[in-house]
Image (cartoon, grey):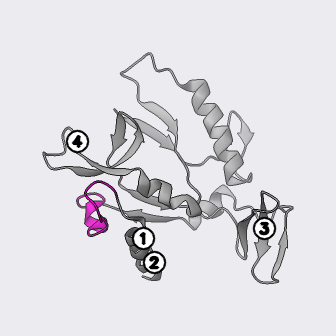
Amino acid sequence: MRALHIIDGLVLGGKEIRNLPYQERMAYIELFVKAISKPSRPDYIRIRAKKVYRFKEITNIFNSMEKHVVKGAGSSPKLCYSCAEDRFYIPQGILFLKVANDPWMIGFSRSRESYYYYNTEIKEASFESSPNVVASFGSSFEKRIFWSWDDGGAEAYLNNCFRDSDKVDKDAILEKLEKFKTV
């Protein structure tokens, strides 16, 4: 099944969203996709809001990776991302988007159970966001990193990341990611 996955937005329904926080842009995209989805026509390409993970939740991606035999991809099992019990696909890579402008970073306070914003230059934190914290669509797009898994899919990059036969080992992939960041 073919699908168009939306990962960010500029304008939806005439409303300018490019300068909203990323999570708000994605909430608008999810509403948009829900409004226009017509599952009754199998010949239409499906439109989906892409599932987004915070970097600290990256193990959720690895926990959803399993080997499957995929129609049209040969007889050997391929590393797939499982998105539902009966749906999975061969990933082509991981896209990393920066959602806070430099020198800001976003943290989570367990005691307050809310996000806070930390300025790494002046070493101050605040629970209130300001316009200079939020990365716009343009800034997120400009600073994106795409870790491509071309030439054979994820196996080409994740060799030796299986400590058992079905699941990707998160520690092994995080080691590879650390090497990727320093290159």
Earlier-in-chain disc, 2 versus 4 = 4
Q: Position of residue 51 (x, y in %)?
A: 53, 46
Whole-number angstrom distance, CA of label 3 to CA of label 2: 24 Å
| N-terminal-most mark, 4 or 1 | 4
Q: CA distance from mark 4 to mark 1?
A: 26 Å
- Residue designated by label 1: 171
Q: Where on the picture, by quarter, is residue 173?
A: bottom left
Q: Amino acid at mark 4?
A: Val
Which amino acid, mark 1? Asp
Residue ID at (14%, 46%): 74
Q: Residue at the top extreme?
A: 40
Element on which disc 3 rests = strand
Q: Which residues are magenta?
A: 150-167
Q: Amino acid at mark 2?
A: Glu
Q: Is residue 162 magenta?
A: yes
* Image position, residue 169 (x, y; %): 37, 64
Residue located beneath label 3 in the image: 117
> Which residue is the site of mark 2?
178
Q: CA distance from mark 2 to mark 4?
A: 30 Å
Q: Quadrant of residue 137?
A: bottom right
Q: For the residues carrying marks 3 and 1, which lies nearer the camera in this image? A: 1
Query: What is the magenta segment's predominant secondary structure?
Result: loop
List the residue tagged with mark 4. 70
For the residue marked with disc 3, what is the amino acid?
Tyr
- Residue drawn at x 71%, y 35% is 14
Q: Quadrant of residue 31?
A: top right
Q: Residues within 10 Å of mark 4 (few under 14, many from 20)?
A: some
